[in-house]
Amino acid sequence: MPATIREVAREAGVSIATVSRVLNGKGQVAEATRALVEAAARRLRYSPDGAAQSLITRRTMTLGVLLPELYGEFFSEFIRGLDLSARGRGYHLLVSSSHSDRREIEAMLRAMRGRVDGIVVMSPDADSSTLVRAVPETIPLVLVNPSRSDERFDVLAIDNYGGAYAITRHLLGLGHRHLAFITGPANNVDALERLRGFRAAVKDLAADQIELRELEGDFREESGYRAGRALLNERSRPTAVFAANDAMAIGALSAFHEAAVRVPDDIALAGFDDIPIARFVAPPLTTVRVAIRQLGERAVERLCVGIDARNGHERRLERVATELVVRASCGGGGRPAAVRRLGGDALGVDE
Amino acid sequence: MPATIREVAREAGVSIATVSRVLNGKGQVAEATRALVEAAARRLRYSPDGAAQSLITRRTMTLGVLLPELYGEFFSEFIRGLDLSARGRGYHLLVSSSHSDRREIEAMLRAMRGRVDGIVVMSPDADSSTLVRAVPETIPLVLVNPSRSDERFDVLAIDNYGGAYAITRHLLGLGHRHLAFITGPANNVDALERLRGFRAAVKDLAADQIELRELEGDFREESGYRAGRALLNERSRPTAVFAANDAMAIGALSAFHEAAVRVPDDIALAGFDDIPIARFVAPPLTTVRVAIRQLGERAVERLCVGIDARNGHERRLERVATELVVRASCGGGGRPAAVRRLGGDALGVDE
DNA sequence: TTGGGCAATGAAAACGTTTACGGTCAGAAT
DNA sequence: ATTCTGACCGTAAACGTTTTCATTGCCCAA
């Protein structure tokens, strides 16, 4: 029903080739005819058919994005980063979320064939490493925070381990010897790495003097709340709690507040991610900042390199740095917010 | 580079027509050949080219989504709703965010031609009503919370007015006579409607006995924080504050906490949206629940109706109901959370 | 034997673009 | 006058599908 290039050509009294040339600004065309064509196009409200363009140019100017179940501020920030960067490069974003199991992701990956020029896959679930085998090797791919790095692909990884290590060290440095850790989903790679960093710091720095406690969570506020309540009921209460993400920390905070347990006076609390709201809870949350938006921007950037090079580029593992953000929730004179950067530049490349 | 249908046909020793029939499950084809073709397709890791399919079928199985600057939990919930509903119907989602001015949106709208089967436009900025004129009338469109309803389009509107009215009545009912309102962005329709509801309730219920104060905000935590501080500095402090959204309420809460002003004892506080985190701040936030995810789901649903009917369906204005959620932040015995529903079914249709 | 009907398949058109190629024409150079 | 050179523009092929239509071969009824 909408106008085609042919109708524009007829209206302007020229051939379709000329119309195409005018609209794409390629090739020589007389000023007079250009004006003619432009007028005709405007009259007919013509805009080219994306499908036909993609078919012939083999470019869709679209990037695919595969995300896990999206929840909370983390993803809106991430998508925002992707979108900003993509739009700046003239790309659209085809997003698909809530992918948990591998088969689903595979199906999506194939469904995107011919619809996108490249794909960003964020699959923090542990079995994602096997997933990529299903990918037609031809399409550029960037993996964000995969369980295992794979030198066949570009990979972006948050330095979860380093961040967790640093914040744990911070807690130990404040003198805490009785710690609790609230974990994330059992098969989530970010969560696992944070746990690993926590354990490593404890082991390295104060192994024998420490009393430890690990509680299960799932990255949502509710689970943090439950964990917080559970802790309060224990005979010997920890002096500091480190939640694997801010949402759970806020949940725990809510439980503490409800029980009139003061933070940080009675108990110290730390999170991870530095979601925007973290500085506005009471007390402001000591946490580890992840440059979420930049993570998205960087992913698109890498992907575009892959696309332009037709995959003929060298693959890299880029580690996105984290930084410790000390606010009031752990006490220890952490105000105003002090920031300590970990592991090189904010977006430094190592390995 | 990836395999085409022609190669599959050759591999299987049949015509491309037969391959197509097998893969789409349409038309008669002998069991033996079917197996042959399927084997060949699998061997070559064939998956059809989306562009070519769209070109011929005139269906992209993709829905466009135009969003404003996305920030915070609201949008991740909304996108989640869209995605869930879209995927259930076999559609993909092409999202594009951060659109502020009209020209940008128009450009996006045209760019989506031939890439999507329909579009969801969320444009809370006041001039969006003029925008739609630029749309080729042919493509199905759903407007979410537009500034003015337009009977040429399907419209989904949050009952901002009703929600604000109800929560203001709640505050008045608790005896507050000195109120402050923190506004949203000046040209944001949701913000404006909430303000209108607030003013109307005051006028209707207690016009002359009330002391009023309106402060500017922009829907982000930071602006709520600033407004909160400003309020504390005033000679005559309000007894209740209603922020046009939860993010700002949380910002204000942070300011109050910092100044050791107790909520709700010293000052009552209410928000709007009921973002997931609202129940986990201290004290839990009294607010107005907006069924964000359902809003997204409903938008896709309406859009699909328009697509299936080739726009030959009757346009509707659907109002998404809101409900008052009473928690502790306003005092008045509101715990555990009591919910009062406003204006018909949760997704009731009026008008 | 003839013909009708049906299942299975293939040939080819169509979708709306971009672009390689060739043609035309005016003016300049010979 | 002839040829050459560009600028300008049109013809047609190509992209990878789906789908219509025709063809083939087979079985069965007349």
Image (spheres, coloured by chain):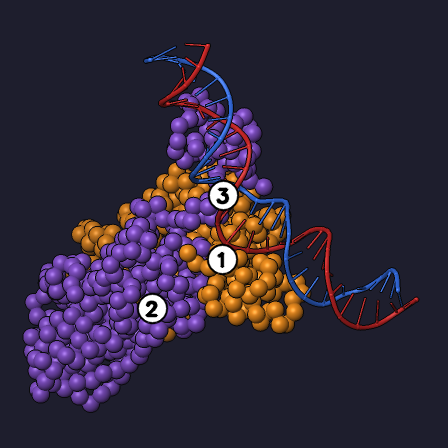
Chain colours: A orange, B purple, C red, D blue
- Element marked by disc 2: loop
Q: Are marks 2 and 3 on the same chain?
A: yes
Q: Is residue B315 visible?
A: yes
- Element marked by disc 1: loop
Whether tag 3 and tag 1 are in contact, CB under 8 A, the answer is no
Q: Answer few, some or many: residues within 10 Å of disc 1's Cα (few below 14, many 20 plus, some between 14 and 19).
A: some
Mark number displayed over residue B49: 3
**Residue linked to disc 2:** B123
Disc 1: which chain? A
Disc 3: which chain? B
- Element marked by disc 3: loop
| A315 lies left or right of B170 | right
Whether tag 2 and tag 1 are in contact, CB under 8 A, the answer is no
> What distance separates the C-alpha of mark 2 from that of mark 1?
29 Å
Q: Nearer the viewer, residue A288 or D17?
A: D17
> What distance separates the C-alpha of mark 2 from that of mark 3?
33 Å
**For residue A281, what is the image quadrant?**
bottom left
Q: Are marks 3 and 1 on the same chain?
A: no
**Residue linked to disc 1:** A4
| Rendered-image quadrant of the C terminus of chain B | bottom left
| Rendered-image quadrant of the N terminus of chain B | top right
Determine whether A37 is above or below A249 in the image.
Answer: below
Q: Are marks 2 and 1 on the same chain?
A: no
User: Residue at the location (23% across, 83% down)?
Assistant: B214
Kind of residue indicated by mark 1 = Thr
Mark 2 against mark 1, which lies toward the viewer?
Answer: 1
Q: Answer few, some or many: residues within 10 Å of disc 2's Cα (few below 14, many 20 plus, some between 14 and 19).
A: many
User: Residue at the location (51% across, 33% down)?
Assistant: B16
Kind of residue indicated by mark 2 = Ser
